[in-house]
Amino acid sequence: MGYEIKRLRCDNGRGEYDNKTLRYVLAARGTTYEPCPPYAHHMNAVAECMIRTITEKARAKMIDSQAPVQFWGEAIITAVYLHQRSPNEGLKRNDHNGYQAPYETPYEMLHGFGKPTHDVDGNKISYQASLHNLRRFGCYASRLIPEVQCRQGKFGPRSKPCMMVGYTHDSKTLWRIWDPEFQKVKAQSEVVFDEERNAHMLCQHGSNEIDMFVVSEDEEYVDETDTGGQDSQPTQIPKISKSHMHGAPDEEAENVHSQRLRREDQTAQRSAADAETAHSRRLRQEDQTAQRSAADAEIITHSRRLRREDQTAQCSAAAIKKSSQVPRAAPAPAPPIGSRVTRSQCKASAGA
């Protein structure tokens, strides 16, 4: 841009700036290397202020969209993209030579510095960035499903719910869209946005309600560029990515979908096994309880029968003892012989 760098001041990062290669390049260009001491952020004020500015913008986007924290990297990239296209007070100030830049945004300064300001006809050339592609971060985005990827027949859906997470720096008609089904960030062009809705809301997936934008730690976070139907290769993304998948989009989608189905099947099998184990354990407990109750009832019945038999035996013994103690009546004495009447006397009395 016409300026020579006199000094390079950094935060004393080991390996990042403090290395032999960078020192050699700076010395060859006549630039002084000035690492600031540890914990002296005020000596690196320009960089620290810019870091704070970008962080605050990204934090505001995360809070407004209520997006999961896994998308902080996308929020940072979007904040930088918007900062380059926002008016900057520093460009309106005069430098030590009294020069004032004729630009209002860093984007214009980057693309228009050193280039002609008017064409051959005297018309002013504008280097302003196009803002027609700006959308709300984290808003609901309906992505068109290409015809070759429609697997639900003629009457299946032709779009899917996604989330807008950023822009592409080399195109004005592409947006970075998070696809919750395949756990990927893709560059899409055929998208319809609803900026009044936050995409973090629950959506219907079959018969189950799931949070469409929860990124599991076991899932691979992939960034893939797709211009609307043509096969493309994945591109490298920020540090949010854990690994990168390679191959055609259709094969990747099918592999991810089959892996999700296998995990769901394994989860269902484990749930069924746990339910069966709990049911058998409950049946065993009920059986043991019933056996204990039957044994207790039998013991109580036997003890009652023994008590009744004992009481009956005691009553019989008491009755026998009482009957043995009652005195017997004495036999009546025989009448005297003189008072006896013989049969002959009875006949004689009857003839007289």
Image (cartoon, rainbow, N blue to C red):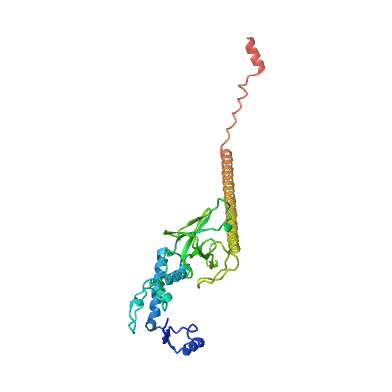
Using the image, determine if residue 326 lies above or below residue 91.
Answer: above
The number of discs equals: 0
55 on left or right of 177:
left
- Closest to the observer: 311 or 75? 75
Q: Residue reaching furthest top?
A: 352
Using the image, determine if residue 24 lies above or below residue 121.
Answer: below
Among the 4 quarters of the image, the one containing residue 97: bottom left
Q: Residue 37: x, y in percent?
A: 41, 86
- Closest to the observer: 110 or 137? 110
Q: Quadrant of the N terminus?
A: bottom left
Q: Residue 107: x, y in percent?
A: 41, 73
Q: Residue reaching furthest right?
A: 344
Using the image, determine if residue 231 lies above or below residue 283.
Answer: below
Using the image, determine if residue 326 lies above or below residue 59.
Answer: above
Q: Residue reaching furthest front?
A: 121
Among the 4 quarters of the image, the one containing residue 315: top right
Q: Quadrant of the C terminus?
A: top right
Q: Residue 233: x, y in percent?
A: 57, 68
- Closest to the observer: 147 or 65? 147
Q: Residue 348: x, y in percent?
A: 65, 12
Q: Residue at x 36, y 72 (%)?
A: 87
Among the 4 quarters of the image, the one containing residue 250: bottom right
- Closest to the observer: 301 or 24? 24
